[in-house]
Amino acid sequence: MKSNKSSEVQNYLDICIASQQLTVYADGNRARSYPVSTAKNGAGELMGSECTPTGWHRIRAKIGAGEPLNAVFIGRRVTGEIYSPELGKQYPQRDWILTRILWLGGLEPGKNRYGKVDTTWRYIYIHGCPDELMTGKPDSHGCIRMHSADALDLFNRVDAGLKVYIHE
Protein backbone atom coordinates (compact mmCIF):
# COMPACT_ATOMS: atom_id res chain seq x y z
CA MET A 1 0.00 0.00 0.00
CA LYS A 2 1.99 2.97 -1.25
CA SER A 3 1.46 6.39 0.30
CA ASN A 4 2.04 9.09 -2.29
CA LYS A 5 0.45 12.49 -2.95
CA SER A 6 -2.42 11.16 -5.04
CA SER A 7 -3.36 8.30 -2.69
CA GLU A 8 -2.26 9.70 0.68
CA VAL A 9 -5.75 10.67 1.87
CA GLN A 10 -7.29 7.39 0.72
CA ASN A 11 -4.60 5.09 2.14
CA TYR A 12 -4.20 5.25 5.89
CA LEU A 13 -4.64 3.44 9.19
CA ASP A 14 -7.54 4.40 11.45
CA ILE A 15 -7.20 3.53 15.15
CA CYS A 16 -10.36 3.94 17.19
CA ILE A 17 -9.73 4.00 20.95
CA ALA A 18 -13.43 3.59 21.78
CA SER A 19 -13.84 0.38 19.75
CA GLN A 20 -10.24 -0.88 20.21
CA GLN A 21 -9.97 -1.44 16.44
CA LEU A 22 -7.32 -0.66 13.84
CA THR A 23 -8.68 -0.41 10.30
CA VAL A 24 -6.61 -0.34 7.12
CA TYR A 25 -8.03 1.90 4.40
CA ALA A 26 -6.80 1.31 0.85
CA ASP A 27 -8.09 3.45 -2.02
CA GLY A 28 -10.66 4.91 0.38
CA ASN A 29 -12.15 1.49 1.20
CA ARG A 30 -11.93 -0.55 4.36
CA ALA A 31 -9.45 -3.30 3.51
CA ARG A 32 -8.88 -5.03 6.86
CA SER A 33 -9.55 -4.56 10.58
CA TYR A 34 -7.71 -5.85 13.64
CA PRO A 35 -8.43 -5.76 17.36
CA VAL A 36 -5.97 -3.62 19.34
CA SER A 37 -5.28 -2.58 22.91
CA THR A 38 -4.53 1.10 23.51
CA ALA A 39 -3.46 2.82 26.75
CA LYS A 40 -4.92 1.88 30.10
CA ASN A 41 -4.69 5.61 30.96
CA GLY A 42 -6.79 6.63 27.94
CA ALA A 43 -6.01 9.22 25.29
CA GLY A 44 -3.43 11.94 25.76
CA GLU A 45 -0.28 13.36 24.31
CA LEU A 46 1.90 14.45 27.25
CA MET A 47 5.27 12.74 27.73
CA GLY A 48 5.18 10.47 30.79
CA SER A 49 1.37 10.18 30.78
CA GLU A 50 1.32 6.59 29.48
CA CYS A 51 -1.63 7.65 27.30
CA THR A 52 -2.22 6.90 23.62
CA PRO A 53 -1.68 10.06 21.55
CA THR A 54 -4.47 11.17 19.22
CA GLY A 55 -4.49 12.96 15.88
CA TRP A 56 -2.58 12.42 12.65
CA HIS A 57 0.67 10.49 12.66
CA ARG A 58 2.91 8.81 10.12
CA ILE A 59 4.75 5.49 10.30
CA ARG A 60 8.30 6.83 10.68
CA ALA A 61 10.03 3.43 10.76
CA LYS A 62 9.31 -0.26 10.30
CA ILE A 63 11.42 -2.44 12.59
CA GLY A 64 11.86 -6.21 12.68
CA ALA A 65 11.63 -7.38 9.08
CA GLY A 66 12.66 -11.02 8.82
CA GLU A 67 12.46 -11.73 12.55
CA PRO A 68 10.39 -14.74 13.67
CA LEU A 69 6.90 -14.52 15.11
CA ASN A 70 7.07 -13.55 18.81
CA ALA A 71 10.66 -12.24 18.56
CA VAL A 72 11.27 -10.03 21.63
CA PHE A 73 12.39 -6.40 21.27
CA ILE A 74 13.88 -4.10 23.90
CA GLY A 75 14.77 -0.55 22.88
CA ARG A 76 13.79 -1.39 19.27
CA ARG A 77 16.47 -4.09 19.15
CA VAL A 78 15.77 -7.80 18.90
CA THR A 79 17.02 -9.68 21.99
CA GLY A 80 17.29 -13.14 20.43
CA GLU A 81 14.49 -14.38 22.69
CA ILE A 82 11.21 -15.83 21.44
CA TYR A 83 8.26 -15.06 23.70
CA SER A 84 6.54 -17.96 25.45
CA PRO A 85 4.25 -17.99 28.51
CA GLU A 86 7.21 -19.44 30.46
CA LEU A 87 9.41 -16.47 29.47
CA GLY A 88 6.55 -14.18 30.47
CA LYS A 89 6.46 -15.73 33.94
CA GLN A 90 10.24 -15.40 34.20
CA TYR A 91 10.08 -11.64 33.48
CA PRO A 92 6.65 -10.46 34.69
CA GLN A 93 7.74 -6.79 34.82
CA ARG A 94 8.49 -6.50 31.08
CA ASP A 95 6.26 -4.52 28.74
CA TRP A 96 6.39 -7.09 25.93
CA ILE A 97 7.10 -5.76 22.44
CA LEU A 98 6.98 -8.66 20.01
CA THR A 99 7.28 -9.62 16.32
CA ARG A 100 7.25 -6.19 14.58
CA ILE A 101 7.32 -2.48 15.42
CA LEU A 102 5.72 0.37 13.48
CA TRP A 103 7.22 3.48 15.14
CA LEU A 104 4.89 6.48 14.91
CA GLY A 105 5.70 10.15 14.47
CA GLY A 106 3.16 12.91 15.12
CA LEU A 107 2.23 15.30 12.32
CA GLU A 108 0.49 18.04 14.32
CA PRO A 109 2.90 20.58 15.87
CA GLY A 110 1.94 21.37 19.46
CA LYS A 111 -0.49 18.44 19.63
CA ASN A 112 1.61 15.32 18.96
CA ARG A 113 4.83 16.74 17.50
CA TYR A 114 7.68 18.65 19.16
CA GLY A 115 8.27 19.40 22.82
CA LYS A 116 6.59 17.45 25.59
CA VAL A 117 3.93 15.96 23.27
CA ASP A 118 6.19 14.45 20.60
CA THR A 119 4.93 10.96 19.70
CA THR A 120 8.29 9.91 18.24
CA TRP A 121 10.26 10.74 21.40
CA ARG A 122 7.56 9.14 23.55
CA TYR A 123 8.44 5.94 21.63
CA ILE A 124 4.84 5.20 20.64
CA TYR A 125 4.56 2.10 18.46
CA ILE A 126 2.08 -0.26 16.90
CA HIS A 127 3.53 -3.62 17.93
CA GLY A 128 2.84 -7.25 18.64
CA CYS A 129 2.28 -8.50 22.17
CA PRO A 130 1.52 -11.80 23.89
CA ASP A 131 -1.93 -13.03 22.90
CA GLU A 132 -2.97 -13.27 26.56
CA LEU A 133 -2.55 -9.47 26.85
CA MET A 134 -5.12 -8.91 24.11
CA THR A 135 -8.27 -8.82 26.24
CA GLY A 136 -10.33 -6.35 24.22
CA LYS A 137 -9.69 -3.63 26.81
CA PRO A 138 -7.26 -0.70 26.87
CA ASP A 139 -4.26 -1.96 28.85
CA SER A 140 -1.02 -0.65 27.27
CA HIS A 141 1.44 1.98 28.48
CA GLY A 142 0.59 4.22 25.50
CA CYS A 143 1.40 2.06 22.49
CA ILE A 144 -1.08 0.25 20.26
CA ARG A 145 -0.77 -3.47 20.98
CA MET A 146 -1.81 -6.18 18.55
CA HIS A 147 -1.81 -9.97 18.41
CA SER A 148 1.64 -10.89 17.08
CA ALA A 149 0.22 -12.60 13.97
CA ASP A 150 -1.84 -9.47 13.22
CA ALA A 151 1.21 -7.22 13.73
CA LEU A 152 3.12 -9.34 11.21
CA ASP A 153 0.23 -9.19 8.72
CA LEU A 154 -0.11 -5.42 9.11
CA PHE A 155 3.67 -4.89 8.82
CA ASN A 156 3.63 -6.72 5.48
CA ARG A 157 0.73 -4.59 4.17
CA VAL A 158 2.02 -1.08 4.91
CA ASP A 159 4.98 1.14 4.06
CA ALA A 160 6.90 3.62 6.16
CA GLY A 161 5.37 7.04 5.61
CA LEU A 162 1.77 5.83 5.68
CA LYS A 163 -0.54 8.14 7.63
CA VAL A 164 -2.21 6.95 10.84
CA TYR A 165 -5.24 8.63 12.43
CA ILE A 166 -5.81 7.90 16.14
CA HIS A 167 -9.07 9.06 17.74
CA GLU A 168 -11.43 8.39 20.65
Image (cartoon, rainbow, N blue to C red):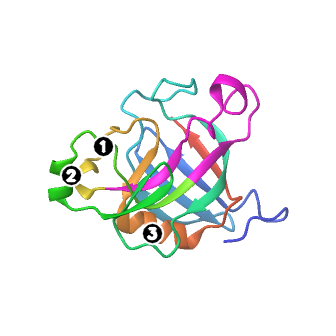
Residue 21 is a magenta residue: no
* Mark-to-mark CA distance, 2 and 1: 8 Å
Q: Position of residue 70 (x, y in %)?
A: 33, 65
26 lies left or right of 92: right
* Mark-to-mark CA distance, 2 and 3: 20 Å
Q: Nearer the viewer, residue 76 or 141?
A: 76
Residue to which mark 1 is pinned: 94
Label 3, secondary structure: give it.
helix
Residue to which mark 3 is pinned: 152
Label 1, secondary structure: give it.
loop
Residue to which mark 2 is pinned: 88
Q: Circle 1: is it few (<14), some (14-19), or many (20+) Cα within 10 Å?
A: few
C-beta proximity under 8 Å, tags 2 and 1: yes
Query: Does 65 appear above or below 90?
Result: below
Which mark is first along the chain, 3 or 1? Answer: 1
Range shown magenta: 103-129
Please, which residue is most extreme toward the front here? 80
78 lies left or right of 91: right
Q: Circle 2: is it few (<14), some (14-19), or many (20+) Cα within 10 Å?
A: some
Query: Does 75 appear above or below 157?
Result: above
